[in-house]
Structures are given as structure tokens and as C-alpha cells.
Image (cartoon, rainbow, N blue to C red):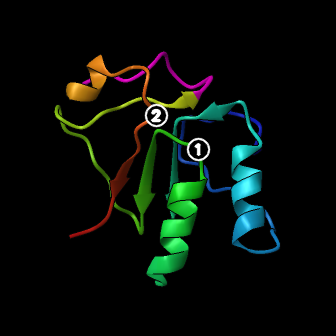
Amino acid sequence: MAQEEIFGPVLVIIPHDGDDDAIRIANDSPYGLSGMVYGTDETRINHVVNGVRTGTMGVNGGIWYAADVPFGGYKQSGIGREMGVAGFEEYLESKAVARPA
């Protein structure tokens, strides 16, 4: 499952040996459109957000979508960034992080 880019409401639970192993599993894919992390420890959350190579990351259910926020994935997900200033900055790897208010 971690090797496919699935579009749909799918919850995949994969056992791991800590945060670094979970990041390794998430990054061991040719795709990197988006991801989600749940937790209460901000240090661990930030470590995962910064370690996972995706174009967007949601935190604790945070969902975003706005015309001025970049959209696009890393690796084989997408063809660069769309929307906002980042649409013009295709050669950078930016990351949108969404947190509930």
C-alpha cells in the first residue's frame, strides 16, 4: 500500500519502529502528493512533517485549500506547483502544513 498513490478514503495502518522508521516507510515511494500526521507532541509532529517528502501535510485533521496556497506533490506526484506565488517557483520544494485553528 505504501508504494501506490491512492485517491480515495483509505486508512492504511502499517506497523513501524518509531518516527524515523515511519518517515522511511512514507518516503519509500515514488509518489509524494500529500500526507497526514496525528499526535500531541509538537516536537514529534514537526519532525515527521519536516521528514516526510510530500507537497502537503495535514496535522491532526487540518485541511487546507486556497488560491494563494501552493498545491502539488514531490517526486512522481504532479508536474510542479500550481496556484499562488509558488506556481511560479516550480524549482523549489515547498510544503503546506495545515493545523486546526
> What residue is disc 1 on?
53
Nearest the camera: 35 or 45? 45
Residue type, label 1: Arg
Gap between marks 1 and 2 measured at Cα: 9 Å
Residue that lies at the very extreme toward the bottom in this rendered image: 41
Q: Decide if residue 93 is in sight here.
A: yes
Q: Is residue 48 left or right of residue 62?
A: right
Percent from the top left, x then y, of residue 11? 62, 56
- Residue 45 on the magenta span: no
| Residue that mark 2 sits on | 93
Q: Residue at x 33, y 57 (%)?
A: 98
Task: Tell me the SS state at disc 1.
Answer: loop
Q: Quadrant of residue 24?
A: bottom right
What amino acid type should be assigned to the residue bearing mark 2? Glu
Q: Are marks 1 and 2 in contact (CB under 8 Å)?
A: yes
Left or right? Give the position of 5 relative to 88. right
Q: Is residue 62 above or below residue 92?
A: below
Residue 74 locus on image (x, y percent): 55, 31
Q: Which residues are magenta?
A: 75-84
Quadrant containing the C terminus is bottom left
Quadrant hosting residue 30: top right
The overriding secondary structure of the stretch rendered in magenta is loop
Identify whether 69 is placed above or below 37: above
Q: How many marks?
A: 2
Q: What residue appears at the point 29 percent right and 21 percent down from the top-left corner?
A: 87
